[in-house]
Image (tube, helix red, strand yellow):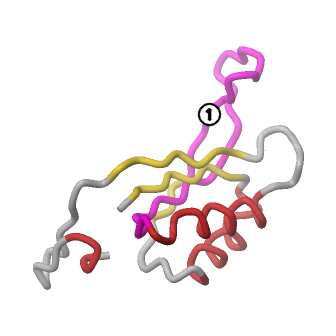
Amino acid sequence: MKKLEVIIRPELKDKTISAIKKMGVGGITVYQVQGLGSEDPPLVGQYFSKDMIICVVDDLKLDDILNAIASVACTGEKGDGKVFIIPVEDALDICTKKRGITSI
């Protein structure tokens, strides 16, 4: 399993969530975040607003999900965002006690 941290433009949040859900991903979490890219000038106290979508996905679906995200979230302009891919060792559904891939 992989945890995806998808940082995107706020106006593309709904399209991106739709694309992820169409790929069979169950739950997601969304945060409003602020930050600067590595190439942005140092702006004291000024940050760009972005949305972060977090989800855990099956390794077998990873490439298809990444392609779906890129197809809807890319405007071709600087600041489109990033996807960070983090290994997930295990997961537990608290109520059903299911573990691993069946828990997501």
Image x and y of residue 35, in percent:
62, 33
Asked which quadrant contains residue 21, the reply is bottom right
Image x and y of residue 34, in percent:
60, 39
Look at the image and say whether residue 42 sits in the magenta stretch.
Answer: yes
The residue at the far front in this view is: 60
Q: Is residue 32 above or below residue 44?
A: below
Which residue has dot 1 on it?
A: 35
The residue at the far right in this view is: 76
Q: Is residue 63 above or below residue 96?
A: above
Relative to 96, 80 lies left or right:
right
Instruction: Specify start and end residues of the magenta stretch as a single range.
Output: 32-59
Q: Residue at x 42, y 64 (%)?
A: 59
Q: Nearer the viewer, residue 17 or 4?
A: 4
Q: Residue at x 80, y 55 (%)?
A: 74
Image x and y of residue 70, in percent:
73, 59
Q: Is residue 48 above or below residue 53?
A: above
Q: Secondary structure at mark 1?
A: strand
